Amino acid sequence: MGAIDKVSGPLVVASDMLGSNMYDVVKVGKDKLIGEIIQLKGPNAVIQVYEDTTGLRPGEPVITTAKPLSVDLGPGLLTSIYDGIQRPLEVLQKKSGSFIARGIEATALDTKKKWKFTSEKGIRKGSRVKSGEIIGHVQETDVIKHYIMVPLGVDGTIESIRDGSYTIDEPVAKIKSGKSSVSITMKQVRPVRKPAPVKTKIRSSVPLITGQRVIDTLFPVAKGGTAAIPGPFGSGKTVTQQQLAKWSDADIVVYVGCGERGNEMTEVLTEFPELKDPKSGKPLMQRTLLIANTSNMPVAAREASIYTGITIAEYFRDMGYDVAIMADSTSRWAEAMREISARLEELPGEEGYPAYLPKRLAEYYERSGSVEALSGKKGSITIIGAVSPPGGDISEPVSQGTLRVVKTFWALDASLASARHFPSINWLTSYSLYSGALEEWYRKNVGEGFVNARKEAMQLLQREAELKDIVQLVGEDALPDQEKIVLDVGRMIRESYLRQIAFDEVDTYTSLSKQSLMLDAILCFRKKADEAVKAGIQSDKIVSMKVKTDIARLKGVKEADVESAVKKVREDMDREFSALSKDAE
């Protein structure tokens, strides 16, 4: 046991800490605040405290637990809402009211609730099992089966295993490992800073379907991939990430609110429990876990919240699930590292961030990927991180360090946001390095035409941008009719397809089949318009056609009715173009 020697904000220096290890969790002061050793200097330990240090005084005791910062894993994780160090907020609220009291403790998982454990077929007394192998399961929610795995580092022969209802701390099996016998419960404990081992990594070739047209069509991310959403204040980062958390086709969603404003996290915490999963029709929270660490919470806990989230994601990935983790935002995480680094008096890097910032960012994003887990099942973790660069300047260190390691870049544009175009992802500066790898999947599951339509739409948007520059110099009237059609169709793609209303009951989510039909209708109009111009019809008559309004309204058509709606639009389109041709004759 040591004693406090110095207090500097969330940083505490303790003396007489010989025998302590880096990243050991300690209890600081009379209130036993939770902290973590981040530096050792002889007998002294530098500790980052995850709670408010107001009132701490030199001489108060510091007790080491001799264990690294870890999370409890087991049935009961889903539907939970935690703070950055995995304390359940609902339990903390009951204990301390609206604000978290200092030194308050609560178990991450309910230790009294009984779960019905069922052993896997082929797993019985005498079975040889390895680390990470699945020995049974619990039906955690209506949509998710929670698999019970052999703890990491344990190999041996099953001495006993029993089905029935147990708490997470009661043994469900015993394994003879070497000369000792290990009791297996439904709970595991894993350190947050150490990636979980896997058998092998697999090439990502399946897209994460989000229901957001600009993402799924133009800039997809693979399951097991990485994506960044940088953008200035008010450009829609949080709403975009919330949309991805709500509608992506991942099996499990982990949403980490890292240093965000309290009102934004309040929206998430109140809205998510009321949402319905579009796949199962069950409450979305049945496959969701939330970690809330708002801007008024201790800064050091922001740094821990990211690791807490990714460790929980790895646990579900090892069961064979596709997990999507949303981090909003990694800039606040980096700011927490900068503050701690400054208090440690480390040599600052660019803009005051620690020199190891790029390394930490890379280590975090590298924990993504599609893998074959130790259990033999295939799972994935897709990491989507928001970045909040000051003034929207992505040349700053956090944005640049992120862009070095992610393969999908959704560039949010303040000018689009101010024009009420959401999602405000700029189609000219964004990119996805997964597009080529995912083409085969799109061909098999959506159709050959969708891949070609995507390429054509991108070419039209790029050509439209070029023509806009020319129009600013010479005016639109100076353009030939064919180029006027390009401008008009580009506008249709932007306003009738890429613009999507997150708060509209129908438009908030669009399936791939509907996306394909909508885009085909727009490109069909472009083809017919080109033919009409070549036949001598003036572009202003084409631009003012009524069918364009019907195309724009397709986004509000329900999924079940979209095929018939598109069929009618095409019939009306043929009729209007035929009428134009007759008038021209």
Image (cartoon, rainbow, N blue to C red):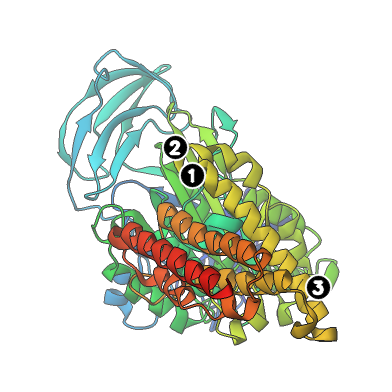
Q: Which residue is mark 2?
A: 318
Label 1 with label 2: CB-CB less than 8 Å: yes
* Residue 295 found in image quarter: bottom right
Instruction: Say what amino acid the circle numbered 1 marks.
Output: Glu
Judge the density around disc 2: few (<14), some (14-19), many (≥20) Cα neighbours within 10 Å.
many
* Residue 494 found in image quarter: bottom right
75 and 479: which is toward the camera: 479
What label does residue 314 carry, if any?
A: 1
Q: CA distance from mark 1 to mark 2?
A: 6 Å
Coordinates of residue 495 in the picture (x, y in percent): 55, 75
In screen coordinates, is 188 left or right of 585?
Answer: left
Q: Which residue is mark 3?
A: 352
Q: Secondary structure at mark 3?
A: helix
**Disc 3 or disc 1, which is closer to the eye?**
1
Image quarter (top left, top right, bottom left or bottom right) of the N terminus: bottom right
Say which residue appears at 53% left-offset and 64% top-offset: 522
Say which residue appears at 34% left-offset and 61% top-offset: 562
Earlier along the polypeptide chain: callout 3 or callout 1?
1
Judge the density around disc 3: few (<14), some (14-19), many (≥20) Cα neighbours within 10 Å.
some
Say which residue appears at 25% left-offset and 61% top-offset: 283
Above or below residue 162? Residue 211 is: below
Q: CA distance from mark 2 to mark 3?
A: 38 Å
Instruction: Say what amino acid the circle numbered 3 marks.
Output: Gly
156 and 16: which is toward the camera: 156
Earlier along the polypeptide chain: callout 2 or callout 3?
2
In screen coordinates, is 143 left or right of 212?
Answer: left
Coordinates of residue 132 in the picture (x, y in percent): 43, 30
Q: CA distance from mark 3 to mark 1?
A: 32 Å
Above or below residue 15? Residue 455 is: above
Instruction: Say what amino acid the circle numbered 2 marks.
Output: Asp
Q: Residue furthest top?
A: 126
- Residue 398: in sight, yes or no? no
